Image (spheres, rainbow, N blue to C red):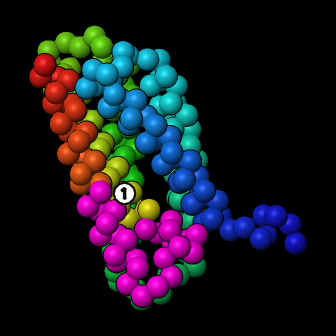
Amino acid sequence: MSFLDRISLRKINSMVLLVIIILLVWHALESLLYLIGITPYSPSLQVTGRRLFLWVSLHVIISLYLFIKDKYVNRKFRKYNNIRNDTQIQIISGIAIVVFVILHVLTYSISPVNILNNYMVYIHFIIDNLLFCSLLIHLTISIPKLMVSFGFLTEENSYEKFSYRISTAFKIIFIILLFAELLYYLF
C-alpha cells in the first residue's frame, strides 16, 4: 500500500487549506499593520499574495475534482440536507472568492494601495470588503469541516458549537478589517 493509498484526497485538500489559512492570516496581518500605519508598505505583501494565490489555485482544482466526483458517484443520494446546504454555500462563496481575488489583484496592479486615485479608493474598498465577506463565509464552513476531517470534533454537538464560535470570531475579524480599511482610506 503506497502513501497515496493511505491518505485521501480530502485530507490532502484539508492540509492545503491549513497552508492557505496560515498564509491568509499572515497576509491579513501584514495588510492590517500597513493600513493602520504601524508598518510601511512592504513588497512582502505581494509575495505572500502570490504564494497564497498558488495554494488557493491548488485548493480550487482539488475541490472541483472532489465535487464532480461526488456528484457523479452520489447522483441519487439525497440525505443530510444541512451538509448539502453548507456545501452549496461553500461552492458559491468559493466562486465569489475566485472572482474577487482576480479583481483584487487587477485593481492593486492598476493602482497600488500606496498610490491611489480618488475613484480607486472606492473600488479597492468595495472589492476588498466583498472579498473579506466571501472569505469569511467560506472559512466559517470550511474550518469546522477541516476540524472534523482531522478528528478534532467527535463529541455530540461539537460541530455546532465550534461553528458558532468560528462564526463569531470571523464577524469580529471582519469588523476589525473593515475598521482598518476605513481608517486608512479616510485619514
Q: Position of residue 170 (x, y in %)?
A: 29, 54
Judged left or right of residue 135, residue 54 is right
Q: Main secondary structure of the magenta part?
A: helix
Picture layout, residue 163 above or below residue 101: below
Q: How many marks?
A: 1
Residue drawn at the location 36% of the way across and 19% of the way down = 39
- Rendering quarter of residue 86: bottom left
The residue singled out by tag 1 in the image is 138
Q: Work out whether 50 lies above or below 151.
A: above
Q: Residue at x 49, y 22 (%)?
A: 44
**Residue at 43 percent of width and 62 percent of height:** 142
Location of residue 13 in the rendering, given as x and y in whole percent from the top left corner: 59, 58
Residue 133 lies in the magenta stretch = no
Residue found at the far left of this picture: 186
Q: Is residue 102 visible?
A: no
Does residue 57 appear to the left or right of 158 in the view shown? right
Residue range corresponding to the magenta coloring: 144-169
* Residue at point 44%, 25% (across, down): 45
Q: Decide: few, some or many residues near mark 1? Use Cα within 10 Å; few <14, some 14-19, many ≥20.
A: many
Tell me if residue 182 comes above or below residue 55 in the rendering: above
The amino acid beneath tag 1 is His
Q: Quadrant of the C terminus?
A: top left
Q: Nearer the viewer, residue 40 or 12?
A: 40
Q: Foreground residue, 137 or 166?
A: 166
Q: Name the spot of residue 68 as percent of width and height, x first.
A: 53, 66
Task: Please tell me in which quadrant of the rendered image residue 127 appears.
Answer: top left
